[in-house]
Image (spheres, helix red, strand yellow):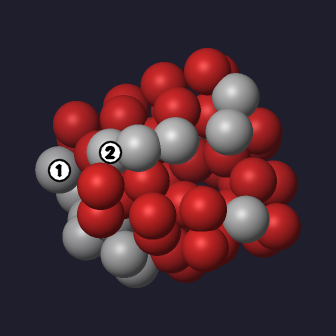
Amino acid sequence: MTGTVREQILAIRDTGLTNMFDVLTVQRLAYDRGYYELVCYLEEHRGEYAHFILTGEV
């Protein structure tokens, strides 16, 4: 996970608009904000994403 992706995840989380485990909504919100790195990351690394959401560890 790059620093950019981490920052984008945290930015989406800070909006409070979705449960972070609702990956499709997270992707939509990311796309709407121009966070294309996060959109692609979620397609290829869902397990790593879930681990980060649960533990805060990269």
- Identify the residue shown where x is 48% and y is 25%: 7
Residue at coordinates 64% horizontally, 72% vertically from top-left? 46
The answer to whether the residues at label 2 and label 1 have Cβ atoms under 8 Å apart is: no
Task: Tell me if 39 is positioned left or right of 9 in this view.
Answer: right
Q: Give the x, y percent position of residue 39.
A: 71, 54
Left or right: residue 37 compared with residue 31: right
Query: Which circle's residue, 2 or 1, is located before the other in the chain?
Result: 1
Q: Image check: 16 left or right of 47?
A: left
Residue 41 percent location from the top left of the image? 75, 53
Residue 16, labelled with which disc? Answer: 1
Query: Which residue is at a point 61% across and 73% down the rendered structure image?
Result: 47
- Inspect this view and state whether residue 25 appears: no
In the structure shown, which secondary structural element does the residue marked by tag 2 occupy?
Answer: loop
Rounded to the nearest angstrom, the CA distance separating label 2 from label 1 is 17 Å
Q: Amino acid at mark 2?
A: Gly
Name the residue type under label 1.
Gly
Number of numbered discs on residues = 2
Q: Nearer the viewer, residue 3 or 27?
A: 3
Most extreme residue toward the left, as rendered? 16
Front residue of this view, candidates 31 and 7: 7
Q: Nearer the viewer, mark 2 or mark 1?
A: 2
Q: Quadrant of residue 5?
A: top right
**Picture quarter with the N terminus:** top right
Task: Decide: few, some or many residues near mark 1? Use Cα within 10 Å; few <14, some 14-19, many ≥20.
Answer: few
Mark 2 neighbour density, 10 Å: few (under 14) some (14–19) many (20 or more): few
Instruction: Judge whether 44 appears above or below 15 on screen.
Output: below
Where is 52 relative to 21, above or below? above
- Is residue 47 visible from the viewing direction of this image? yes
11 in relation to 36, above or below:
above
Q: Mark 1 falls on what kind of element?
A: loop
x, y percent for residue 16? 17, 50
Q: Which mark is drawn over residue 56? A: 2
